[in-house]
Amino acid sequence: MKLLHIIATTRGEQSRTLSISKEFLKTLNKKHPEVKVDELNLATTELPPVLATTVDAKYMMMAGQTLDDATMASYKKVTAMAEHFISYDLFLITAPMWNFSIPYMLKHYIDVIMQAGVLFSFTAHGPEGFAKYEKMVCITSRGSDYSPGGPMHALDHQEPYLRAIFGLAGIEEVHFVHAQPMDMAPGLTQMALEKAMEEARQMVDKLDLKNMPSVGTK
């Protein structure tokens, strides 16, 4: 079983969000040492640009047309990342909230990998995702409190977007651990951080990995 840890923070080891993810990974390694963890740090990874040739290739492929050499080269760069993504069983996303949503490098990555024919397809009954058995954990940190029922909840475009876009790929089991509020007061920050770390440790059991098939056995 393989897990891909997608890191979308520019703060490196100073990242509070990453410190929470490390607690999840420590617990995962202790309880499930058989899970192989790979890391994709989007702050240090050069992602392929989504150029006009890439978009043209996407529509040409969907229409069953033949691609020329330049268009095919552009298309292969994005599909390679999409195929890399879907080769994993589990996903951990480390992403602080930026401007009520996700960091730009994570949006770029999503725009690259969300390729019809690789992560999903369009059918007569609507889109069908190919990652139906995969599971995802998203660990975030937010300056304010965006909990349901609170005054800031309507501005949370992070969790709904991640649920929707990876739902398109077929991932129905998406869990969230939110550290919030992180920028209101030092005392609240430490309490929120400790609470999120405990939730992250408990999340390992919620995934029920013992009954989960791996990509290679599906």
Image (tube, helix red, strand yellow):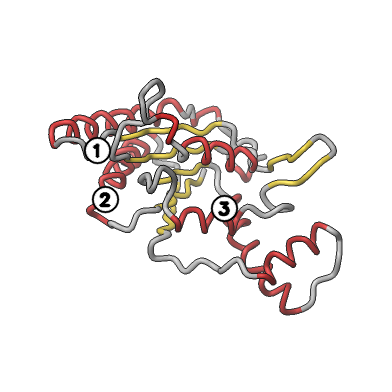
Is 16 left or right of 122, judged from the image as shown?
Answer: left
Q: CA distance from mark 1 to mark 2?
A: 12 Å
Q: CA distance from mark 3 to mark 1?
A: 30 Å
Which residue is at 65% across, 61% downward? 79
Sequence order check, earlier mark of 1 and 2 = 2
Sequence order check, earlier mark of 3 and 1 = 3
Q: Can you say whether 51 is above or below 12 in the image?
A: below
Crowding around mark 2 (Cα neighbors within 10 Å: few <14, some 14 to 19, many 20+) is some
Which residue is at 26% across, 50% downward? 15
Q: Which residue is mark 1?
A: 182
Q: Secondary structure at mark 2?
A: loop
Give the farthest residue toward the bottom: 69
Position in image of residue 62 (x %, y %): 80, 57
The numbered mark at residue 85 is 3
Marks 3/1 in contact by CB < 8 Å: the verdict is no
Mark 3 or 2, closer to the camera: 2
Mark 3 or 1, closer to the camera: 1
Q: Quadrant of residue 166?
A: top right
